[in-house]
Image (spheres, helix red, strand yellow):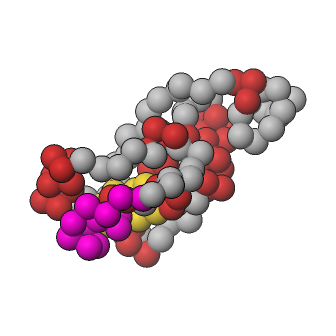
């Protein structure tokens, strides 16, 4: 299993690589639902089950949100679009694998979508 999180709030990735919880002092990401520091219990499960955690930029998250809207016509909040954002650039760790992702959350204001304009298509 490979996890994904925003580069501006990468405490889980840092923690997994360090073998201990490493909090991010000032998380900075559009994915506001992923700004909290990882807790002991989730970290224990990550250490047990997760092979690696990759990070994605806010720009990739916004691209993922927009593509999910344009292609599938679903509104996904930034935190929910993080897994799909990882697939957009297909890092080597993901190539050649069977991949399943969970895309969730429509908790965002349609009048303030991150790609501008008054609506999902920017019109």
Q: Residue at x 75, y 42 (%)?
A: 115
- In the rendered image, residue 105 lying in the magenta stretch gets the answer no
The stretch of residues the image draws in magenta is: 13-24
Percent coordinates x, y for residue 30 in the rendering? 59, 45
In the rendered image, the vertical position of residue 14 relative to residue 112, given as above or below: below
In the rendered image, the vertical position of residue 55 relative to residue 106, given as above or below: below
Percent coordinates x, y for residue 92 in the rendering? 43, 75
Whether residue 17 is visible here, answered yes or no, is yes
Residue 65 shown left or right of residue 27 in the figure: right
Q: Quadrant of residue 104?
A: top left
- Judging depth in this view, the residue of 56 and 24 nearest the camera is 24
Q: Residue at x 39, y 44 (%)?
A: 36
Q: Quadrant of residue 98?
A: bottom left
Q: Residue at x 68, y 37 (%)?
A: 70
Question: Where does the C terminus fall, quadrant-wise?
Answer: top right
In the rendered image, the vertical position of residue 71 relative to residue 19, given as above or below: above
């Amino acid at each position: 299993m490979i996890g994904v999180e925003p580069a501006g709030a990468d405490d889980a990735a840092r923690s997994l690589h360090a073998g201990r919880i490493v909090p991010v002092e000032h998380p900075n990401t559009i994915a506001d639902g992923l700004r909290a520091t990882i807790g002991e219990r989730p970290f224990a499960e990550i250490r047990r089950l997760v092979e690696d955690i990759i990070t994605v930029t806010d720009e990739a998250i916004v691209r993922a949100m927009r593509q999910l809207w344009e292609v599938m016509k679903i509104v996904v909040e930034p935190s929910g679009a993080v897994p799909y954002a990882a697939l957009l650039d297909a890092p080597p760790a993901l190539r050649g694998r069977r991949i399943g992702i969970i895309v969730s959350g429509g908790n965002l204001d349609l009048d303030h979508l991150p790609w501008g304009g008054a609506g999902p298509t920017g019109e």
